[in-house]
């Protein structure tokens, strides 16, 4: 005999906690309308505030870099441009992810968030390539920098970057898309500190080669973060098993917690988007009634949700 569980629509808002499994025979579209509240309103609010602050500071650093003739400051302004773009893409990704599933996109549009994170990482690589190219030219032919003006603008930028990083910090712990934007802001916070220290050093010793050297150092740090972000996004797009969940442990947990389950095989586990996990598996039981398999299915789904945060489980029962 065989039976298949009904399909759960994943959590619409990750901050709600565990949802009720008794959705009956609702379709994903009906389930979406049952959860009619805005998708991730807090993250959207934080991103909106950060976009305004970052945009204003980007313009300020551009003017300040031209005023002081500082490549490091102009590079930081360019870096902030990518941050503004990252915030905008992250914001739009959340808005698109809120769209309900359709017959052609049965999982909805949650993967847009992962694509957003990957796009953020790519923009970091591009901007770093441009900064390094300009810095090499400055190393060959150092140019005088108005270091005092450079420090003043960098201090203001540091304050703005700290504020935006703090706004995004809490949400970045649980959301890969927000994490991408947060890493952008954190990187620019460190770059502002480096620009300030470099400006002070140039003021004291008139060593203008520090300016391009700082730019190259910042690029190396940013590229390391971009690598980690790219790796995480690619894992999701490749439907790899989440790093903190082991397939064998999931199967053993089901067998140990539910005596009627003799074996679990052909188990597949993947991540739809941040903290939204899906699972399919063949569950071997004795020659029991269909009603009994429904009870086992409900118990298994609740266990998977509570223990592993797997909210989309499809279980096929076999004798």
Image: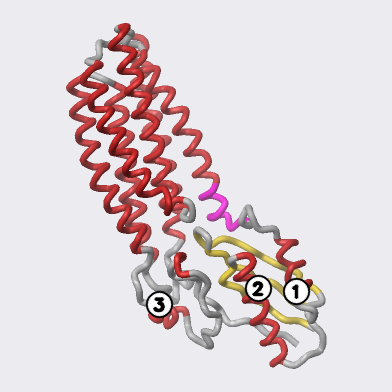
* Residue 243, percent from left and from top: 63, 53
Using the image, determine if residue 296 lies above or below residue 143. Answer: below
Q: Residue at x 31, y 50 (%)?
A: 88
Q: Quadrant of the C terminus?
A: bottom right
Secondary structure category for the residue under label 2: helix
Give the labeled residue for mark 1: 257
Q: Residue at x 34, y 13 (%)?
A: 201
Secondary structure category for the residue under label 3: loop
Q: Earlier in the sequence, mark 2 or mark 3?
A: 3
Give the labeled residue for mark 2: 303
Give the label, 2 or 3, closer to the camera: 2
- Residues 200 and 50: in front is 200
Q: Earlier in the sequence, mark 1 or mark 3?
A: 3
Quadrant in the picture for residue 59: top left
Cα gap from disc 2 to disc 3, whole angstroms:
23 Å
Quadrant in the picture for residue 258: bottom right
Residue 238 painted magenta: yes
Cα gap from disc 1 to disc 3, whole angstroms:
31 Å
- Label drawn at residue 35: 3
- Label drawn at residue 227: none
Q: Residue at x 26, y 20 (%)?
A: 70
**Quick check: 206 left or right of 263?**
left
* Residue 34, percent from left and from top: 40, 81
Q: Earlier in the sequence, mark 1 or mark 2?
A: 1
Using the image, determine if residue 210 lies above or below residue 28. Answer: above
- Residues 257 and 109: in front is 257
Using the image, determine if residue 234 lies above or below residue 74. Answer: below
Q: Quadrant of the N terminus?
A: bottom right
Q: Which residues are magenta?
A: 232-240
Secondary structure category for the residue under label 1: helix
* Residue 169, percent from left and from top: 41, 48
Q: Are marks 1 and 2 in contact (CB under 8 Å)?
A: yes
């Amino acid at each position: 005999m065989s039976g298949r569980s009904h399909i759960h629509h994943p959590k619409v808002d990750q901050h709600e906690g565990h949802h009720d499994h008794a959705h009956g025979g609702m379709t994903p579209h009906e389930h979406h309308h049952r959860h009619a509240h805005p998708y991730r309103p807090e993250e959207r609010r934080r991103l909106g505030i950060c976009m305004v602050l970052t945009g204003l500071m980007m313009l300020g650093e551009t003017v300040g870099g031209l005023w002081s003739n500082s490549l490091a400051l102009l590079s930081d302004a360019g870096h902030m441009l990518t941050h503004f773009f990252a915030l905008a893409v992250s914001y739009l990704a959340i808005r698109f992810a809120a769209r309900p599933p359709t017959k052609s996109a049965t999982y909805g549009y949650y993967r847009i968030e992962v694509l957003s994170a990957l796009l953020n990482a790519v923009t970091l690589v591009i901007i770093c390539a441009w900064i390094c190219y300009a810095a090499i030219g400055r190393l060959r032919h150092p140019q005088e920098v108005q270091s005092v003006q450079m420090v003043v603008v960098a201090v203001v930028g540091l304050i703005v970057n700290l504020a935006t990083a703090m706004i995004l910090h809490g949400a970045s712990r649980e959301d890969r898309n927000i994490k991408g934007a947060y890493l952008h802001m954190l990187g620019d916070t460190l770059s502002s500190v480096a620009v300030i220290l470099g400006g002070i050093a140039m003021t004291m010793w008139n060593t203008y080669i520090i300016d391009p050297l700082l730019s190259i150092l910042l690029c190396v740090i940013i590229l390391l973060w971009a690598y980690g972000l790219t790796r995480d996004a690619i894992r999701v797009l490749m439907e790899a098993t989440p790093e903190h969940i082991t397939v064998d442990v999931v199967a053993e947990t089901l067998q140990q917690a539910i005596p009627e389950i003799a074996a679990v095989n052909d188990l597949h586990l993947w991540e739809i988007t941040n903290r939204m996990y899906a699972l399919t598996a063949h569950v071997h039981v004795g020659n029991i009634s269909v009603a009994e398999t429904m009870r086992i299915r409900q118990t298994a789904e609740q266990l998977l949700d509570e223990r592993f945060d797997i909210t989309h489980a499809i279980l096929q029962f076999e004798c």
